[in-house]
Image: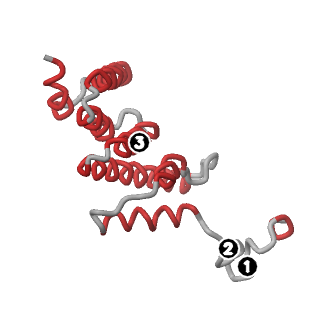
Amino acid sequence: MISHQLPGLLVESRDPLALAPDVVVDVHEIGRRVAALEGDRSAGLPPAMLDRLRTAELLPGWYEDWVVAEQERWKQLRLSALERLASRYLERGETDQANDAAGFAIAIEPLRESAQRLLLETHIADGNYAQALRAFEVFKSRLWREFGVEPSAKITKIMAPLLT
């Protein structure tokens, strides 16, 4: 059926679902680019790639145990890459890109404190203190509402000069 609807997608082999060599798999492409980030401190990603990291879910709608485990691994890889990029952009003073990368990580995992911290640092670096305070209050409220805990000392220390 697939071979008739999408000719050239699959090739004959011992594996019943072998993809043709010229088929581009987004997960592989993103994985290669993320791996290159680890080896090169000066590396960045094109803005379109940032958006792909935000939206590149692995087999959405599949719930088999092996898929769920791989989906979580993939999500963690994406989050780590987005945070790494946000940190690098922030170090270079590229706050718009840092804001995007941190915001995309937060969109994936809203209560991930490391991503929230990067977003706050970006707002502060830009001199957007009101925006930093607003983002901190939203995060703090949500953290309290969902888990009954306060933000860590690390994030509170970043915000301390604005809170006094």
Numbered mark located on residue 100 in the image: 3
Image location of residue 152, percent across then percent down: 20, 31
Q: Quadrant of residue 11?
A: bottom right
Specify the quadrant that holds the C terminus.
Answer: top left
Q: In percent of the image, x 33 and y 47: which residue is there?
A: 86
Q: In percent of the image, x 41 and y 62: which residue is there?
A: 34
- Side of 47 relative to 87 (left or right): right
Which is more foreground, mark 3 or mark 2? 3
Which is more foreground, mark 3 or mark 1? 3
Q: Pick whichever of labels 1 and 2 is earlier in the sequence.
A: 1
SS type, badge 2: loop
Q: Pick whichever of labels 3 and 1 is earlier in the sequence.
A: 1
Image location of residue 141, percent across then percent down: 34, 19
Instruction: Tell me if mark 2 has few (under 14), some (14-19) or many (20+) residues whose alpha carbon lies within 10 angstroms of its own.
Output: some
Mark 1 is on which residue type?
A: Val
Q: In percent of the image, x 28 and y 27: which residue is there?
A: 128
